[in-house]
Amino acid sequence: MTAPYPFLSATPPHAPQALLERAKSLPPPRVALVNAGAPNPLQGIREAMEADLAEPILIGDRAKIEATARDIGWDISGVRLIHAPRDTAAPEAARLVRAGEADAIMKGQIHTSTFLKQLLPSAAGLRDKGARCGHVFHITTPGSDRPLLLTDAAMNVDPDVATRKACLGHAVRLAQTLGVERPKAGLLAPTEDLVETVPNTIEAAEIAEWAATALPDAVVQGPMAMDLILSADAARAKNYRSEVSGDADIILTPNITTGNAVFKTMAFGMGCCCAGIVLGMRVPVLLTSRAQAAPARIAAAALGAVVAAR
C-alpha cells in the first residue's frame, strides 16, 4: 500500500463547541432523513438525536431501515418511520415540510444531484418563485471555533452573477445568525486586478459594488486572490488595503470546482471540520457525505438546528 501524501492532515476533525452550544440551547428540529436505510446516514442521525440536535424522521424502505438499525444496535421503536422507498423518499420529505411536520431535511443514501433535483423544482413547494438557493460550508480549523463560510462547493456548478449574489446573501445572513454582526467577505479570483480575459475578476467587482448597497451590514471586497483573503501580511506586502484580508468570515467562490477543491483541501489537508447546508428553501437542507466523519455530521446537524430556529 502506498504511503499517504505527506501534506494530508493526521489531525482528526472536531465539531466546534461554540456551534454545538448554540444549537443545544434551541429546540431540536424535526429532521427528515431521506433514504435512511444505510449505516452511515442512520448512524449520523442517531448521533444527532443523542446529542439533542435533532428529532429524526426516517424515510425510505422500511425493511432496509429496520435491518440497518438492528445492525448498528439502535432501537428505533420510538422513532417515526415512513415507508417511501427509492425515488419517493425525497418527495415525501418535501410533503412533510409543506404539512408543517418537518423542520429540516437531511440527505441519506442518495446521490446529491438526484436528491436536490427532487427538492428544488417549484412543484416541490420548498422555495419561493424565483428564489435562488446556495450551498454553504461552515468550516472550522483544529483548535478554533471561529467559522469560515465557503460558498458554493457542492451545488451550483457554474453560477452566474445573480446566483452568486444570492449565495453571498445567504452566507452573510448565516454569519449574522451565528453572531457575526458585520461579516467580512472576500470574492475569490486569481488576482485583485480587473482583467478582461479573466471574466471572474470583472464579475467579482460587479458583485462587490452591488453588495455595498444590497448588504450594508457586511464588508464585501473583490476580486481578491486567496493570499489576500487569508493573509494580512500578504496584503501589506502587495500594498493592498482591505478590512477583509486576514479576517474573512466568508469566501465566495466563482464555481463548484474551485469551491470543492478549497473545501477538500481544508478538510483533508488541514483537518478542518466542514458542515454543509443548502439555504434558500423553506427549511435548511443538510448535505452529509459518506466520507464525512462523525464530527462533521454532528456539526451539520447543529448548523441545521441553528438555521431552522431563526
Image (cartoon, rainbow, N blue to C red):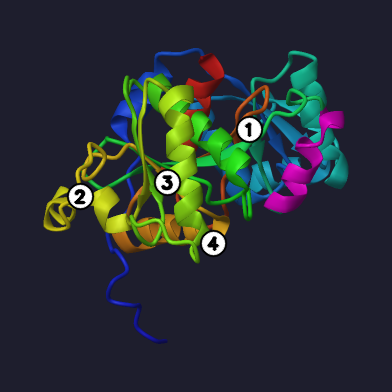
Rounded to the nearest angstrom, the CA distance separating label 1 from label 2 is 58 Å
Q: Dot 1: few (<14), some (14–19), or many (≥20) neighbours within 10 Å?
A: few
How far separated are the C-alphas under marks 1 and 4?
40 Å
Report, in whole angstroms, how far the alpha carbon at label 3 lies from the one at label 1: 29 Å
Front position among marks 4 and 2: 2
Q: Is residue 121 magenta?
A: yes
User: Which residue corresponds to mark 3?
Assistant: 274
Which residue was labeled with disc 1?
75
**Quarter assignment of residue 58:** top right
- The amino acid pointed to by label 3 is Cys
Which stretch appears magenta?
112-124
Residue 295 or residue 242, whichever sits in front: 242
Disc 1 marks a residue whose amino acid type is Asp
Q: Earlier in the sequence, mark 1 or mark 2?
A: 1
| Residue 257: numbered disc | 4
Disc with the residue nearer the chain's start (3 vs 1): 1
